[in-house]
Image (tube, rainbow, N blue to C red):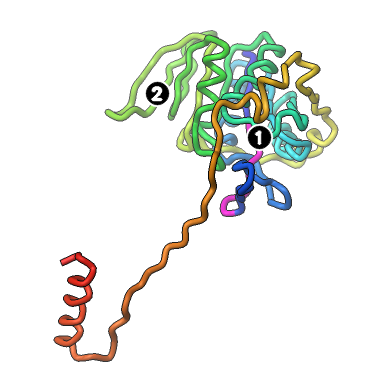
Amino acid sequence: MEMIVLIKQVPEIGEAKIDPETGTLNRKGIPLTMNPIDYNAIELALQIKEERGGKVRVISMGPQSAEKALREALALGCDEAFLLTGQEFAASDTYATAYALTRLVDFLKPWDIIITGEKAIDGDTGQVGPAVASFLNIPILTYAIRCQLIDQSHFLIERTIESGVQRITLSSPFLITVTKGMNIPRFPTLRGKITARQKEIKKFNAQSLGISEDSIGLSGSPTRVVKVENFKIERKGKILKDMDPTVMADQLVQFLIERGAW
C-alpha cells in the first residue's frame, strides 16, 4: 500500500502574526511546529503500513525551516520526505498551494491513498485537501473519524456529517482528511530520531516540476486579503461595590436604560 501524507508547518498557537501590508502570514521570528492534526494523518498511514505493508511518503510545502516537521515525520516512521520550497511559492493561497502540491503528488506516482489533517490551525480553512483531490480527479472523504481496511484495496470509512455519522466503503485511489479523534498519535523513538537525521529530504522547486510561476504565489492566488485590522474591544462599564443593594439595583437599571438594553 503506497501512501502519501500532506503535512504543514504552522506557527505555534497564539504566535501567528499577519503582515498588515500584504495580508499574509509573517513567519519571521515565530516558533514553528507541525500542524497538530497532521500527527493523526501520519498515525493512520503508519497503522495501515503496519497492517498491510507498503510505504509512507510525507510531503510539505514551505520554507527551508519546514525540514524540521518533515524530519519529525521521518522519526515517527515515515519512509521518505519531500519538500516543495522556493521564494516563488511565498504568499500562495489555498488554491495555489493545492495546485503546487498536486504537481508533486502527481510526480510521485504510483500511490494508493493520500491522507491529510482536516485543516491547519493557522488558516483554519480545510480547503487544501479537497482541492488536491479535485485537481487529481479522485474521490475524497473529509472529517473521517475511522478508517478500517476490509481487503487489499477496500476501506470502510466513517465520517462526521451534520446529521450524524456516515459510513462509506471506498476503494483506492482516494484522498481522506482525518479529525483529531481518528486516533492517538505515537511518539518518536530514539532510534527513529537517529534514523531521521540520516535520511535525505528531497527538495523540489517550481522549475524542477515545470510549474509556471504565474500559477503560484500571489500571482497565482485568486483570493486576496485586502485589509487587515486589529479590533480593540472597549468595555465601558461601571463597577458597583460596597453599596446598599437597593441603590446598586437602581443604578444597574438606570445603566441598562441609558444603553437601550432595558
> Residue 45 appears at what percent x and percent y?
59, 24
Q: Is residue 152 magenta?
A: no
Q: As rendered, which of 50 and 33 lies closer to the eye? A: 33
Q: As rendered, which of 35 and 47 lies closer to the eye? A: 35
Residue tagged 2: 158
Location of residue 35 by image quarter: top right
* Helix, strand or loop under label 2: strand
Which label was assigned to residue 48? none
Q: Which residues are magenta?
A: 7-14
Using a 10 Å C-alpha cutoff, classify the residue at mark 1 as few (fewer than 14 neighbours), some (14 to 19) or many (20 or more).
many
Q: Is residue 10 magenta?
A: yes
Residue 102 in sight in this render = yes
Looking at the rendered structure, the kind of residue marked 2 is Glu
Looking at the rendered structure, the kind of residue marked 1 is Ala
Residue 44 in sight in this render = no
Which quadrant of the rendered structure holds the N terminus? top right
Dominant secondary structure (helix, strand or loop) of the stretch shown in magenta = loop
- Mark found first going from the N terminus, 1 or 2: 1
Q: Which residue shows up at 68% across the image and 10% down it?
A: 109
